[in-house]
Image (cartoon, grey):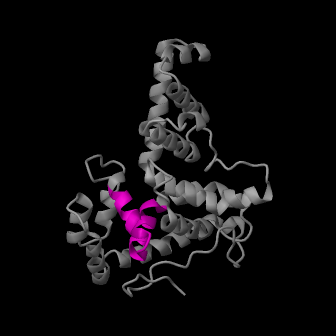
């Protein structure tokens, strides 16, 4: 059985499995794991190649246009749903594009399966990359099989009231947590999952500004996405105090050296989030 859009369009995605529940099929042997993962991703890509050009899908996408912003204009006129993915790319920084456009799409996806399928394709490369390190720990299924249903749930249930910042990275982090970290937490009650760890509590105090709240979210997502701890810790330290020289003193480096490290840290965060 496959999930269909609410317009009755052709099936677009396997049903999501509950968090922590593994598919019954046995996991491929290590020798075949990488090849099987590539085949699974290829099946998703073939499904997307059909979906993105279907007339029924394109007609349905026009119903997402309710305003006069870049997202709406793209939804009304596109002849390929890939154009919407392109619009949500993090390299776009204009008003209503990039992260802004992805926010619009995810809001629609909460009640629209076709929109959710577009979001899934948008974050699929990041999901595959982030899931790969968990392959040695999965006994019953390849990590891609586990993380894709988890991503579907993350897309459908994303809470905009509690989460801010870079949306693609947040969705990937939520999927990784649902697929791998939450089951691990059940096995080890003492573990605190990185995807939800409140390491930035002092940045998001009750009187914190919106900018600080968003910064905390960005740094949390960056750390979960694999940015080295030394980079994240430096940016957290700089956010906690306006005195860069004191941070340099604590690190026992010159102010110039601190600025160099800050530049490297910012670039590391930008590269990860844009790639997501």
- The vertical placement of 44 against 179, above or below, is below
> Horizontal and vertical percent for residue 235?
52, 30
Q: Is 229 above or below relative to 139? A: above
Q: State whether residue 253 is above or below residue 184.
A: above
Q: Is 119 left or right of 179, judged from the image as shown?
A: left
- The location of residue 62, given as percent across then percent down, is 25, 74
**Residue 114 drawn in magenta:** yes
Q: Residue at x 46, y 56 (%)?
A: 160
| Quadrant of the image containing the N terminus | bottom right
Question: Residue 64 falls in which quadrant of the image?
Answer: bottom left
Instruction: Tell me where residue 27 sits by quadrant.
Output: bottom right
Residue drawn at x 57%, y 75% as measured from the top left: 16
Report the side of 215 relative to 93 (left or right): right
* Residue 176 x, y percent position in the rendering: 60, 58
* Rendered location of residue 163, percent (x, y): 49, 51
State which region is magenta. 101-124
**Camera-side residue of 252 and 153:** 153
Q: Quadrant of residue 188?
A: bottom right
Magenta stretch contains residue 118: yes
Depth check, front residue: 119 or 215 = 215
């Amino acid at each position: 059985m496959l999930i269909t859009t609410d317009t009755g369009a052709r099936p677009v995605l396997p049903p999501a499995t509950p968090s922590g529940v593994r598919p019954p099929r046995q996991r491929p042997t290590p020798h075949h794991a990488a090849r099987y993962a590539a085949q699974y991703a290829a099946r998703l890509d073939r499904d997307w190649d059909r979906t993105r050009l279907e007339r029924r899908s394109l007609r349905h996408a026009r119903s997402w246009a309710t305003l006069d912003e870049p997202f709406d204009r793209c939804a009304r006129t596109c002849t390929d749903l890939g154009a919407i993915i392109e619009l949500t790319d993090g390299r776009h920084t204009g008003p209503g594009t990039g992260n802004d456009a992805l926010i619009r799409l995810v809001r629609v996806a909460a009640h629209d399966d076709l929109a959710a399928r577009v979001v899934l394709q948008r974050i699929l490369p990041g999901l595959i990359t982030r899931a790969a390190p968990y392959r040695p720990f999965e006994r019953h299924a390849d990590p891609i099989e586990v993380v894709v249903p988890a991503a579907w749930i993350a897309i459908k249930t994303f809470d905009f009231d509690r989460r801010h910042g870079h949306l693609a990275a947040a969705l990937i982090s939520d999927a990784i947590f649902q697929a791998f970290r939450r089951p691990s937490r059940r096995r080890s009650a003492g573990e605190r999952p990185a995807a939800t760890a409140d390491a930035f509590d002092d940045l998001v105090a009750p009187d914190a500004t919106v900018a600080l709240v968003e910064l905390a979210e960005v740094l949390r997502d960056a750390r979960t996405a694999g940015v080295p701890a030394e980079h994240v810790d430096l940016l957290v330290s700089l956010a906690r105090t306006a005195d860069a020289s004191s941070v340099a003193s604590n690190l026992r480096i010159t102010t110039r050296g601190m600025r160099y490290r800050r530049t490297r840290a910012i670039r590391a965060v930008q590269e990860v989030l844009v790639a997501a």
